[in-house]
Image: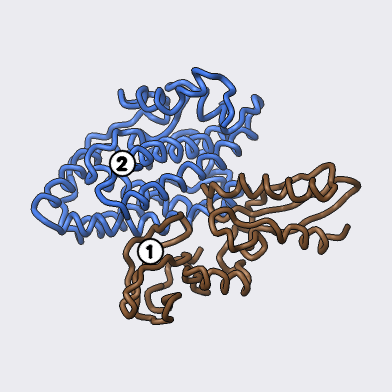
Protein backbone atom coordinates (compact mmCIF):
# COMPACT_ATOMS: atom_id res chain seq x y z
CA UNK A 1 0.00 0.00 0.00
CA UNK A 2 1.38 3.41 -0.92
CA UNK A 3 1.70 6.44 1.34
CA UNK A 4 -1.19 8.10 -0.52
CA UNK A 5 -3.49 5.14 0.17
CA UNK A 6 -2.58 5.12 3.86
CA UNK A 7 -3.17 8.84 4.12
CA UNK A 8 -6.59 8.25 2.53
CA UNK A 9 -7.40 5.66 5.21
CA UNK A 10 -6.35 8.13 7.88
CA UNK A 11 -8.89 10.67 6.65
CA UNK A 12 -11.25 8.94 9.07
CA UNK A 13 -9.12 10.08 12.06
CA UNK A 14 -10.38 13.31 13.56
CA UNK A 15 -9.12 15.78 16.13
CA UNK A 16 -10.97 14.82 19.34
CA UNK A 17 -11.18 18.48 20.45
CA UNK A 18 -12.48 19.86 17.14
CA UNK A 19 -14.12 16.71 15.71
CA UNK A 20 -15.04 18.36 12.41
CA UNK A 21 -11.31 18.53 11.55
CA UNK A 22 -9.29 15.52 10.40
CA UNK A 23 -5.71 15.22 11.60
CA UNK A 24 -4.68 15.99 8.03
CA UNK A 25 -6.73 19.22 7.98
CA UNK A 26 -5.04 20.15 11.23
CA UNK A 27 -1.55 19.54 9.84
CA UNK A 28 -0.68 17.05 12.59
CA UNK A 29 -0.30 14.13 10.18
CA UNK A 30 3.12 14.48 8.53
CA UNK A 31 3.84 11.25 6.65
CA UNK A 32 3.28 7.51 6.44
CA UNK A 33 5.60 4.77 5.26
CA UNK A 34 5.21 1.03 4.81
CA UNK A 35 7.90 -1.60 5.10
CA UNK A 36 6.76 -5.23 5.17
CA UNK A 37 3.76 -5.51 7.48
CA UNK A 38 4.82 -2.46 9.48
CA UNK A 39 3.50 1.01 8.82
CA UNK A 40 5.09 4.04 10.40
CA UNK A 41 3.01 7.18 10.78
CA UNK A 42 4.70 10.44 11.77
CA UNK A 43 2.77 13.08 13.69
CA UNK A 44 3.82 16.46 15.09
CA UNK A 45 2.09 17.74 18.24
CA UNK A 46 0.20 21.03 18.05
CA UNK A 47 0.98 22.15 21.61
CA UNK A 48 3.37 20.88 24.27
CA UNK A 49 0.54 19.82 26.53
CA UNK A 50 -2.08 18.97 23.94
CA UNK A 51 -4.11 16.17 25.60
CA UNK A 52 -5.51 15.20 22.19
CA UNK A 53 -2.21 13.70 21.02
CA UNK A 54 -2.58 10.46 22.99
CA UNK A 55 -6.09 9.97 21.62
CA UNK A 56 -4.92 10.74 18.08
CA UNK A 57 -2.15 8.15 18.38
CA UNK A 58 -4.62 5.52 19.62
CA UNK A 59 -7.09 6.38 16.82
CA UNK A 60 -4.37 6.05 14.15
CA UNK A 61 -3.45 2.60 15.49
CA UNK A 62 -7.08 1.54 15.61
CA UNK A 63 -7.74 2.75 12.07
CA UNK A 64 -4.75 0.98 10.53
CA UNK A 65 -4.95 -2.28 12.48
CA UNK A 66 -8.61 -2.61 11.51
CA UNK A 67 -7.41 -2.23 7.90
CA UNK A 68 -5.10 -5.19 8.25
CA UNK A 69 -1.78 -3.79 9.38
CA UNK A 70 -0.13 -5.97 12.01
CA UNK A 71 2.38 -3.41 13.23
CA UNK A 72 1.53 0.25 13.46
CA UNK A 73 4.23 2.53 14.72
CA UNK A 74 3.28 6.12 15.53
CA UNK A 75 6.31 8.39 15.80
CA UNK A 76 6.11 11.86 17.32
CA UNK A 77 8.39 14.31 15.55
CA UNK A 78 9.04 17.62 17.32
CA UNK A 79 11.06 19.45 14.66
CA UNK A 80 10.06 21.36 12.67
CA UNK A 81 7.49 22.53 15.21
CA UNK A 82 3.83 22.50 14.23
CA UNK A 83 2.47 25.84 13.14
CA UNK A 84 -1.03 27.06 12.25
CA UNK A 85 0.39 27.59 8.73
CA UNK A 86 -0.04 23.82 8.33
CA UNK A 87 -3.82 24.00 8.62
CA UNK A 88 -5.21 23.18 5.18
CA UNK A 89 -7.59 25.47 3.26
CA UNK A 90 -10.31 22.90 3.85
CA UNK A 91 -9.44 22.93 7.54
CA UNK A 92 -9.76 26.71 7.72
CA UNK A 93 -13.18 26.59 6.08
CA UNK A 94 -14.37 23.87 8.44
CA UNK A 95 -13.22 25.95 11.43
CA UNK A 96 -15.19 28.94 10.22
CA UNK A 97 -18.31 26.85 9.63
CA UNK A 98 -17.96 25.52 13.18
CA UNK A 99 -18.03 29.11 14.50
CA UNK A 100 -14.27 29.29 15.15
CA UNK A 101 -12.34 32.12 13.51
CA UNK A 102 -9.34 30.59 11.67
CA UNK A 103 -5.84 31.79 12.62
CA UNK A 104 -4.28 34.78 10.92
CA UNK A 105 -1.83 33.77 8.22
CA UNK A 106 1.13 35.71 9.49
CA UNK A 107 2.68 32.76 11.37
CA UNK A 108 3.82 35.28 13.94
CA UNK A 109 2.53 35.19 17.50
CA UNK A 110 3.35 38.89 17.93
CA UNK A 111 1.13 40.06 15.10
CA UNK A 112 -1.60 42.55 16.14
CA UNK A 113 -4.39 40.04 15.70
CA UNK A 114 -7.21 42.45 16.49
CA UNK A 115 -6.92 44.06 13.08
CA UNK A 116 -7.39 40.96 10.99
CA UNK A 117 -9.71 38.66 12.89
CA UNK A 118 -13.16 38.35 11.38
CA UNK A 119 -16.27 37.31 13.25
CA UNK A 120 -17.07 33.79 11.92
CA UNK A 121 -20.79 34.61 12.12
CA UNK A 122 -21.10 37.99 10.37
CA UNK A 123 -17.56 38.62 8.97
CA UNK A 124 -17.24 41.92 10.84
CA UNK A 125 -13.69 43.01 11.58
CA UNK A 126 -14.80 44.96 14.61
CA UNK A 127 -13.97 42.47 17.37
CA UNK A 128 -12.62 42.65 20.92
CA UNK A 129 -10.52 40.25 22.96
CA UNK A 130 -12.27 38.84 26.03
CA UNK A 131 -9.60 36.36 27.13
CA UNK A 132 -6.29 35.26 25.66
CA UNK A 133 -7.12 31.65 26.48
CA UNK A 134 -10.39 30.09 25.37
CA UNK A 135 -12.00 26.68 25.67
CA UNK A 136 -8.73 24.96 24.74
CA UNK A 137 -5.10 26.13 24.83
CA UNK A 138 -5.12 26.74 21.08
CA UNK A 139 -7.97 29.26 21.19
CA UNK A 140 -8.66 32.76 22.48
CA UNK A 141 -12.09 34.16 23.30
CA UNK A 142 -13.32 37.18 21.33
CA UNK A 143 -16.60 39.06 20.98
CA UNK A 144 -17.95 40.62 17.82
CA UNK A 145 -18.87 44.26 18.34
CA UNK A 146 -21.23 44.22 15.36
CA UNK A 147 -23.39 41.14 15.99
CA UNK A 148 -22.34 40.91 19.67
CA UNK A 149 -21.72 37.15 19.51
CA UNK A 150 -18.79 35.79 21.49
CA UNK A 151 -16.61 33.39 19.48
CA UNK A 152 -13.43 31.33 19.68
CA UNK A 153 -10.41 32.39 17.67
CA UNK A 154 -7.84 29.73 16.73
CA UNK A 155 -4.64 31.47 17.81
CA UNK A 156 -1.73 31.96 15.49
CA UNK A 157 1.01 29.52 16.45
CA UNK B 1 25.90 13.40 37.87
CA UNK B 2 26.08 13.83 34.10
CA UNK B 3 25.90 17.61 33.47
CA UNK B 4 23.91 17.49 30.26
CA UNK B 5 21.29 15.33 31.98
CA UNK B 6 21.25 17.66 34.94
CA UNK B 7 20.83 20.77 32.78
CA UNK B 8 17.76 19.35 31.00
CA UNK B 9 16.39 17.81 34.22
CA UNK B 10 16.42 21.20 35.99
CA UNK B 11 14.40 22.74 33.19
CA UNK B 12 11.95 19.84 33.28
CA UNK B 13 11.60 20.22 37.05
CA UNK B 14 10.88 23.95 36.73
CA UNK B 15 8.12 23.26 34.21
CA UNK B 16 6.64 20.40 36.23
CA UNK B 17 6.63 22.06 39.64
CA UNK B 18 5.33 25.40 38.37
CA UNK B 19 2.70 23.59 36.28
CA UNK B 20 1.61 21.68 39.39
CA UNK B 21 1.27 24.92 41.37
CA UNK B 22 -0.69 26.64 38.61
CA UNK B 23 -3.06 23.69 38.29
CA UNK B 24 -4.05 24.17 41.95
CA UNK B 25 -6.14 27.13 40.75
CA UNK B 26 -8.23 24.94 38.46
CA UNK B 27 -11.82 25.53 39.55
CA UNK B 28 -10.77 28.16 42.13
CA UNK B 29 -9.63 31.19 40.10
CA UNK B 30 -11.39 34.53 40.63
CA UNK B 31 -13.58 34.23 37.53
CA UNK B 32 -14.30 31.77 34.74
CA UNK B 33 -12.13 33.18 31.91
CA UNK B 34 -9.18 33.48 34.23
CA UNK B 35 -9.71 29.97 35.54
CA UNK B 36 -9.56 28.64 31.97
CA UNK B 37 -6.53 30.75 31.10
CA UNK B 38 -4.61 29.59 34.18
CA UNK B 39 -5.45 25.93 33.54
CA UNK B 40 -4.38 26.26 29.89
CA UNK B 41 -1.04 27.78 30.86
CA UNK B 42 -0.57 25.04 33.48
CA UNK B 43 -1.17 22.47 30.74
CA UNK B 44 1.54 24.05 28.58
CA UNK B 45 3.97 23.75 31.49
CA UNK B 46 3.12 20.15 32.27
CA UNK B 47 3.34 19.29 28.56
CA UNK B 48 6.73 20.92 28.35
CA UNK B 49 7.80 19.02 31.46
CA UNK B 50 6.84 15.74 29.76
CA UNK B 51 9.06 16.49 26.75
CA UNK B 52 11.96 17.75 28.85
CA UNK B 53 11.87 14.86 31.33
CA UNK B 54 11.56 12.32 28.51
CA UNK B 55 14.60 13.90 26.88
CA UNK B 56 16.49 13.99 30.19
CA UNK B 57 15.80 10.27 30.59
CA UNK B 58 17.62 9.54 27.33
CA UNK B 59 20.71 11.38 28.57
CA UNK B 60 21.45 9.13 31.56
CA UNK B 61 22.28 5.45 31.89
CA UNK B 62 19.35 4.59 34.16
CA UNK B 63 16.93 5.14 31.27
CA UNK B 64 14.20 6.53 33.47
CA UNK B 65 10.91 7.53 31.81
CA UNK B 66 9.13 10.86 32.23
CA UNK B 67 6.86 9.20 34.81
CA UNK B 68 9.76 7.69 36.77
CA UNK B 69 11.35 11.12 36.96
CA UNK B 70 8.17 12.96 37.89
CA UNK B 71 6.66 10.53 40.38
CA UNK B 72 9.45 8.42 41.85
CA UNK B 73 12.07 10.94 42.93
CA UNK B 74 12.34 12.33 46.45
CA UNK B 75 12.56 15.98 47.41
CA UNK B 76 16.37 16.16 47.44
CA UNK B 77 16.46 14.80 43.88
CA UNK B 78 14.39 17.68 42.44
CA UNK B 79 16.35 20.65 41.09
CA UNK B 80 13.77 23.33 40.27
CA UNK B 81 14.16 26.98 41.22
CA UNK B 82 12.60 27.69 44.63
CA UNK B 83 10.37 30.38 43.08
CA UNK B 84 8.44 27.65 41.22
CA UNK B 85 7.51 25.69 44.35
CA UNK B 86 6.30 28.57 46.56
CA UNK B 87 2.64 28.15 47.59
CA UNK B 88 0.14 29.93 45.36
CA UNK B 89 -0.78 32.58 47.97
CA UNK B 90 -3.39 35.10 46.81
CA UNK B 91 -3.97 35.78 43.13
CA UNK B 92 -1.61 38.77 43.22
CA UNK B 93 1.22 36.52 44.40
CA UNK B 94 0.37 33.88 41.80
CA UNK B 95 0.41 36.43 38.96
CA UNK B 96 3.57 38.20 40.15
CA UNK B 97 5.49 34.92 40.37
CA UNK B 98 4.04 33.91 37.00
CA UNK B 99 5.09 37.09 35.25
CA UNK B 100 8.64 37.02 36.62
CA UNK B 101 9.09 33.38 35.57
CA UNK B 102 7.31 33.86 32.21
CA UNK B 103 9.67 36.75 31.40
CA UNK B 104 12.62 34.49 32.28
CA UNK B 105 11.25 31.65 30.14
CA UNK B 106 10.67 34.02 27.24
CA UNK B 107 14.36 34.88 27.00
CA UNK B 108 15.50 31.37 27.89
CA UNK B 109 13.44 29.61 25.23
CA UNK B 110 14.19 32.30 22.63
CA UNK B 111 17.87 31.41 22.99
CA UNK B 112 17.40 27.66 23.33
CA UNK B 113 15.96 27.56 19.80
CA UNK B 114 19.56 27.57 18.57
CA UNK B 115 20.80 25.02 21.14
CA UNK B 116 23.39 22.52 19.93
CA UNK B 117 21.12 19.89 21.50
CA UNK B 118 18.65 19.35 18.64
CA UNK B 119 15.86 17.94 20.84
CA UNK B 120 16.12 20.89 23.21
CA UNK B 121 16.01 23.27 20.24
CA UNK B 122 12.85 21.55 18.97
CA UNK B 123 11.17 21.75 22.38
CA UNK B 124 12.15 25.43 22.60
CA UNK B 125 10.71 26.19 19.15
CA UNK B 126 7.33 25.04 20.45
CA UNK B 127 7.68 26.48 23.95
CA UNK B 128 8.62 29.98 22.80
CA UNK B 129 5.27 30.47 21.05
CA UNK B 130 3.36 29.34 24.14
CA UNK B 131 5.49 31.49 26.40
CA UNK B 132 4.90 34.53 24.20
CA UNK B 133 1.19 34.18 24.97
CA UNK B 134 1.89 33.47 28.66
CA UNK B 135 4.04 36.53 29.25
CA UNK B 136 1.64 38.77 27.35
CA UNK B 137 -1.20 37.67 29.61
CA UNK B 138 0.68 37.75 32.94
CA UNK B 139 2.33 41.06 31.95
CA UNK B 140 -1.10 42.59 31.22
CA UNK B 141 -2.24 41.58 34.70
CA UNK B 142 0.83 43.20 36.29
CA UNK B 143 -0.18 46.52 34.70
CA UNK B 144 -3.93 46.18 35.34
CA UNK B 145 -3.56 45.23 38.98
CA UNK B 146 -0.39 47.19 39.80
CA UNK B 147 -1.87 50.35 38.32
CA UNK B 148 -5.37 49.45 39.48
CA UNK B 149 -7.23 50.10 42.72
CA UNK B 150 -5.50 50.89 46.02
CA UNK B 151 -6.05 47.35 47.20
CA UNK B 152 -4.86 45.66 44.00
CA UNK B 153 -1.78 47.91 44.00
CA UNK B 154 -1.00 47.08 47.62
CA UNK B 155 -1.37 43.35 47.01
CA UNK B 156 0.86 43.43 43.92
CA UNK B 157 3.53 45.40 45.78
CA UNK B 158 3.39 42.95 48.70
CA UNK B 159 3.72 40.06 46.26
CA UNK B 160 6.69 41.67 44.53
CA UNK B 161 8.45 42.36 47.85
CA UNK B 162 7.85 38.79 48.98
CA UNK B 163 9.02 37.03 45.81
CA UNK B 164 11.86 39.31 44.71
CA UNK B 165 14.52 37.57 46.81
CA UNK B 166 13.86 34.34 44.92
CA UNK B 167 14.65 35.81 41.48
CA UNK B 168 18.43 35.84 41.91
CA UNK B 169 18.50 32.06 41.68
CA UNK B 170 17.20 32.24 38.08
CA UNK B 171 20.57 33.59 36.97
CA UNK B 172 23.05 31.98 39.33
CA UNK B 173 25.57 30.10 37.19
CA UNK B 174 27.22 26.94 38.48
CA UNK B 175 29.27 24.20 36.82
CA UNK B 176 26.20 22.78 35.08
CA UNK B 177 25.35 26.14 33.45
CA UNK B 178 29.01 26.69 32.56
CA UNK B 179 29.10 23.27 30.92
CA UNK B 180 25.87 23.98 28.99
CA UNK B 181 26.97 27.38 27.74
CA UNK B 182 30.47 26.15 26.80
CA UNK B 183 28.91 23.38 24.68
CA UNK B 184 26.31 25.67 23.10
CA UNK B 185 23.51 23.69 24.80
CA UNK B 186 22.17 26.62 26.81
CA UNK B 187 22.62 30.38 27.09
CA UNK B 188 24.93 32.28 29.39
CA UNK B 189 22.82 33.15 32.48
CA UNK B 190 24.43 36.59 32.81
CA UNK B 191 23.28 37.65 29.33
CA UNK B 192 19.85 36.26 30.14
CA UNK B 193 19.70 38.39 33.26
CA UNK B 194 20.29 41.63 31.35
CA UNK B 195 17.40 40.93 28.97
CA UNK B 196 15.13 39.88 31.81
CA UNK B 197 15.90 42.95 33.92
CA UNK B 198 15.22 45.29 31.02
CA UNK B 199 11.75 43.80 30.41
CA UNK B 200 10.84 43.36 34.05
CA UNK B 201 11.95 46.80 35.23
CA UNK B 202 10.00 48.48 32.40
CA UNK B 203 6.89 46.48 33.18
CA UNK B 204 7.03 47.06 36.95
CA UNK B 205 7.55 50.80 36.48
CA UNK B 206 4.62 50.96 34.04
CA UNK B 207 2.57 49.18 36.70
CA UNK B 208 3.58 51.92 39.22
CA UNK B 209 5.27 49.30 41.39
CA UNK B 210 8.40 49.97 43.42
CA UNK B 211 11.29 47.68 42.53
CA UNK B 212 12.75 46.33 45.78
CA UNK B 213 16.24 47.72 46.27
CA UNK B 214 17.82 45.31 48.69
CA UNK B 215 17.48 41.68 47.94
CA UNK B 216 18.31 38.85 50.23
CA UNK B 217 18.97 36.13 47.70
CA UNK B 218 17.34 32.86 48.61
CA UNK B 219 18.58 29.81 46.73
CA UNK B 220 19.05 26.08 47.09
CA UNK B 221 16.61 24.48 44.65
CA UNK B 222 19.31 23.61 42.17
CA UNK B 223 21.23 21.80 44.88
CA UNK B 224 18.10 19.91 45.88
CA UNK B 225 17.62 21.95 49.06
CA UNK B 226 14.02 23.13 49.08
CA UNK B 227 11.58 25.26 51.04
CA UNK B 228 9.20 23.59 53.47
CA UNK B 229 6.45 23.88 50.83
CA UNK B 230 8.08 21.32 48.53
CA UNK B 231 7.37 18.19 50.59
CA UNK B 232 3.64 18.85 50.67
CA UNK B 233 3.59 19.59 46.94
CA UNK B 234 5.32 16.29 46.14
CA UNK B 235 3.08 14.37 48.53
CA UNK B 236 0.04 15.54 46.61
CA UNK B 237 1.59 15.16 43.15
CA UNK B 238 3.09 11.72 43.74
CA UNK B 239 0.74 9.97 46.13
CA UNK B 240 -1.08 7.87 43.54
CA UNK B 241 2.09 6.33 42.05
CA UNK B 242 3.61 5.94 45.51
CA UNK B 243 0.52 4.23 46.93
CA UNK B 244 -0.25 2.13 43.86
CA UNK B 245 3.06 1.64 42.03
CA UNK B 246 2.70 1.27 38.28
CA UNK B 247 -0.98 2.21 38.26
CA UNK B 248 -2.16 3.12 34.77
CA UNK B 249 -4.76 5.70 33.79
- Tell me the chain of label 1: A
Residue A75: give x, y in percent of width and height.
71, 47
Protein chain holding label 2 = B
Foreground pick, A96 / B224: A96
* Residue A16: numbered disc: none
Q: Nearer the viewer, residue A106 or B219?
A: A106
User: Quadrant of the image for the C terminus of chain B?
Assistant: top right
What residue appears at the point 60 percent right and 37 percent down from the top-left corner? B54
Q: Residue at x 80, y 58 (%)?
A: A6
In the picture, measured across the screen, residue B248 lies left or right of residue B13, that is right
**In the figure, B72 relative to A77: above or below?**
above
The shade of chain B is blue
In the rendered view, tell whether residue A96 sits above or below residue A71: below
Quadrant housing the N terminus of chain B: top right
Q: Which residue is mark 2?
A: B167
Q: Secondary structure at mark 1?
A: strand
Among all residues in the image, which is located at the extreme left?
Answer: B150
- Labels 1 and 2 share a subunit: no
Q: Color of chain A here? A: brown
* Element on which disc 2 rests: loop
- Position in image of residue A39 (x %, y %): 82, 49
Q: Which mark is residue A141?
A: 1
- Residue at the (41%, 72%) spot, across then down: A113
Residue B18: x percent and y percent?
39, 39
Depth order, front residue of A143/A129: A143
What's the residue at 38%, 24% (across, down)? B225
Query: Is residue B62 visible from the viewing direction of this image?
Result: yes
Q: Is residue A69 left or right of residue A51?
A: right
| Residue B117 in view | no
Amino acid sequence: MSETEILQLLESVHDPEIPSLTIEDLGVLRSARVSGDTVEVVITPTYSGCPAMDVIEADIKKCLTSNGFGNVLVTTRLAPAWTTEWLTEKGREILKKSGIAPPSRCGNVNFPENRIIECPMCDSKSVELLSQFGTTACKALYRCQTCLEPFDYFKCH
Amino acid sequence: MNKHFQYVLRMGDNALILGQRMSEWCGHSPFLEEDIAMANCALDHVGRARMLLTHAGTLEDKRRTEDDLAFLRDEREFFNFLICELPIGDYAFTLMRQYLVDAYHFHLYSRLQTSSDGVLAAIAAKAIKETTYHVRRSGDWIIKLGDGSDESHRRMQDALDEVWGYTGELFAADEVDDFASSKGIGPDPHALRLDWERDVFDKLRAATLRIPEEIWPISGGRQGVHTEAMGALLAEMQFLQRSYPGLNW
